[in-house]
Amino acid sequence: MLRLRNLRNKYQKRLIRPLYAQTQATPYAAVLDDSLRTAATGDFNLPAAAFKYKNGLVPGTVMVQKGEKVTVHTGSGVAGYKSFGLLANFVGGDLDDLGDENYVGVWRGPDSVYEILSPGFNDDALLTAWNASGQGTPVPLYVGVDGRLSTAAASAGSGGLGGTLGAAQEVIAYLIERPNQNRIVVDLKV
């Protein structure tokens, strides 16, 4: 449930919607890494490189598992860890789902299909890649430097997991449909 702090946000939609997830996907119950919460005040301490919307994380952000906890995959500070799935909740800011809790949902499961609404994905280069593919060929999506799905992967210079964009870079999902600039459909691969 969204815990709105401002009435003007009452029409905010969920940014990630499972389309084919009955047997393919698992909504994994996870705990946020301690580095994302300030111990003294309990406030969220979001990574500087992570994309923020209304001062918080958005659903659809790529998460990485560190031991038994999850954190934002921004390409830096997570070397050696694999991508774990897509964040299911708004975390922190004006659209916080968590309140005082540290428990989040992470959608994961290869071959599950999701609809992701803007700003839950990075559309900067996505349109160009979609048009170049002939709008029918799946486009590989990687974790971008801000933690969202993007066609531009985090590079080795920014501490990316797989090095420079290429065969070694981990494909998080495939873009299979882009009905408009505010909505994409992806086939998850993690």
Image: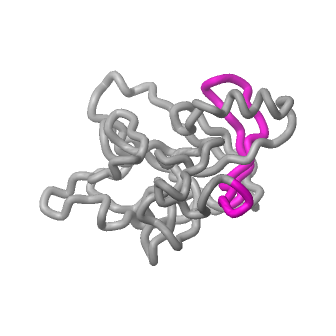
Residue 179 within the magenta-colored segment of the rendering: yes
- Where residue 63 sits in the image (x, y, percent)? 51, 58
- Where residue 80 sits in the image (x, y, percent)? 52, 73
Residue 73 visible (yes or no): no
* Residue in the foreground of this view, choosing between 76 and 53: 76
Query: With respect to residue 179, does 58 lie above or below?
Result: below
Quarter of the picture holding the N terminus: top left
Point out the residue furthest to the front here. Answer: 157
- Where residue 56 sits in the image (x, y, percent)? 35, 42
Provide the residue span drawn in magenta. Answer: 166-190
In which image quadrant can residue 16 be found? top right
In which image quadrant can residue 6 be found? top left
Residue 48 visible (yes or no): yes
- Which residue is drawn at the image coordinates 69% and 63% (left, top)? 168
- Which residue is drawn at the image coordinates 63% and 32% (left, top)? 125
- Which residue is drawn at the image coordinates 27% and 53% (left, top)? 45
Residue 98 within the magenta-colored segment of the rendering: no
Compared across the picture, whether 139 is left or right of 151 comes to right
* Residue in the foreground of this view, choosing between 141 and 53: 141
Point out the residue furthest to the left here. Answer: 40
- Which residue is drawn at the image coordinates 13% and 61% (left, top)? 40
- Where residue 127 sits in the image (x, y, percent)? 69, 28
Quarter of the picture holding the C terminus: bottom right
Compared across the picture, whether 90 is left or right of 119 comes to left
Compared across the picture, whether 144 is left or right of 48 comes to right
Compared across the picture, whether 98 is left or right of 74 comes to left
